[in-house]
Amino acid sequence: MKNVKLIGHALGLLPLLYMLFLGVTGLGANPIERLTHETGQWGLILLLASLAITPLVKLPTSVNFKPIKQLKLKKVMLWRKYFGLYAFCYIVMHFLIYLTLDLSLDFEFLIDDIKDRPYITVGFLALLLLVPLAVTSAQTLRRKMGRHWIRLHKLVYFINALALLHFFWLIRADYSEFWWYLIAFSLFMLFRFVEKARRLVRV
Amino acid sequence: MSRFCLKESFVTSETDYYRRRDFMRLGAVNALALGAASAGMLGLSSSVTASPASPDFIRKAKAAKKTIVADDKLNDFDDITQYNNFYELGTSKTDPYKNASALITDPWSVSVEGLCAKPGKLTLEDLLKPHDFEERIYRLRCVEAWSMVIPWMGFPLADLLKRFEPSTDAKYVAFETLYDKGRPLPGQRGRSIRWPYREGLRMDEAMNPLTFMAVGLYGKVLPNQNGAPLRLVVPWKYGFKSIKSIVKIKFVSEQPETSWNQLQSREYGFYSNVNPAVNHPRWSQARERRIGELRKRRTLMFNGYEKEVAGLYKGMDLQRYF
């Protein structure tokens, strides 16, 4: 269990280490843009990664094969929370870079951007919606809230979609990278739809 | 005034060209001392991909006068050559620098077509022969809301176009970038844009004294990633209008198709004049980040060249003809 926790934290911190490495070796001609893109991209990747855990645990364990059962993959489910929280951290950094260096902390600019720029509108909404999820991530709260907790945290699917839309609306011509993110998201969602459909059929 | 040691290294002699690493190191030391882009220097090897300068080029570069200067601080050579939009060499900002060697600029020829008395195909040497070089420091404003200040070397586009004696029916001039279907450049394998890249200007815009044909940068041969061997520089328009690595010039009577306009006409107009009052549908054009600066600055009408070019658009609704 301890190892699983450790690896989970290490994975969540890797992007930060990578950015520190970039900070030392060179962020290029436009370091602020680079950092904005890196923090946003890693936030999105970790959000997607948190959606990947459930299928990656459930698919192998549904196979009746002893060596896989012995892996005790279920422990990895904890990473959903870790990845979600690390994603939140990177996205907050992403927002703060934009707020301080792009907008010079001018809140009128922020309000104008949220009103007039659809990619900012959806990005900002995604950030806002992540707040209640991050606040209620503690195990004790989860127990206290019961069914409501699950319902609340299903918001993460919607947040992921908003984050993808935020990314999509920023692209000028080259969508090649975007399609990979969309395929990943679609696969993780497809798994959930299939599961739900199977459950309904069984009932 | 210039913080770059232009005087000493203004001319590219053969030996200087092969010693360019030393030059770059000198540049890096300067930049470090001034605290600009300090981290950027460590990661990337400082080499330049450009054709060697011909004796004719060296002679003209030596004689080049500074005809237009700006109060703005120059961006350093590394920033100008390692942060580019040149989709033929890849869509990321660092791709053109990495893939620069894929662009072969020698031999090079330019085809001149359309409504003019003297069309024809010119070798680069013949094209450059009658033109003396001058140095002009221009602000470059990208449609993505960043900007740089760049010392170009070249000659006015009008001087070149007049040689072909355009007819009175020629209302526009269209340009095309290199595209060899059999041997595409790294970025031309993808279909992000319909190749070849196309751009165009209204005749009076093309003939405006500010409109420039650049063949050099910082007194040296234009590096491949900056659009070698010759590129347009139209400083009051968004950067994508300044087409790179030109192989075709055509005089036409109708407004020509231009690449970004073809891709998304709602977002990129034919004129694409820098205008802080007309936003890109997805982002604001009111402010820009000057490369090397931390905070954004206000964008100026016509990128600060209002005095020189506003007359071209007198009576036009710039919200409509964006």
Image: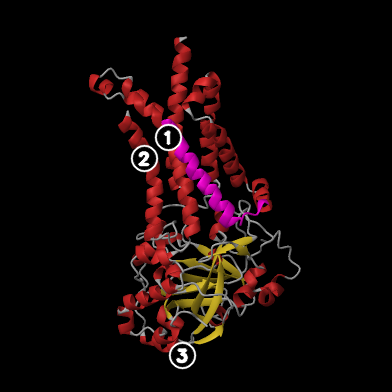
Amino acid under disc 2 = Leu
Q: Residue at x 65, y 60 (%)?
A: B286
> Image quadrant for the C terminus of chain B?
bottom right
How crowded is the residue under tag 2: few (<14 C-alpha within 10 Å), some, or many (20+)?
A: some
* Secondary element type, mark 1: helix
Q: Residue at x 40, y 27 (%)?
A: A54
Whether residue B245 is visible to the viewer of this picture, yes or no, is: no
State yes or no: discs 1 and 2 in contact (Cβ < 8 Å): yes
State yes or no: discs 3 and 2 in contact (Cβ < 8 Å): no
Q: From what the image shows, is residue B247 above or below residue A186?
A: below
Amino acid under disc 1 = Tyr
Q: CA distance from mark 3 to mark 1?
A: 64 Å
**Camera-side mark, 3 or 1:** 1
* Secondary element type, mark 2: helix
Q: CA distance from mark 1 to mark 2?
A: 9 Å
Which of disc 2 and disc 1 is earlier in sequence? Answer: 2
Q: Which residue is mark 2?
A: A11
**Residue lying farthest to the right in this orientation:** B315
Q: Which residue is mark 1?
A: A82
* Chain letter of disc 3 in the image: B
Task: State the extent of the magenta-drawn residues as a range.
Answer: A80-107
How crowded is the residue under tag 1: few (<14 C-alpha within 10 Å), some, or many (20+)?
A: some
Whether residue A11 is visible to the viewer of this picture, yes or no, is: yes
**Of residues A8 and B227, which is closer to you in this image?**
A8
The percent coordinates of residue B273 (x first, y second) are: 63, 66
Q: From what the image shows, is residue A106 above or below residue B315?
A: above
Amino acid under disc 3 = Ala
Q: Which residue is mark 3?
A: B63
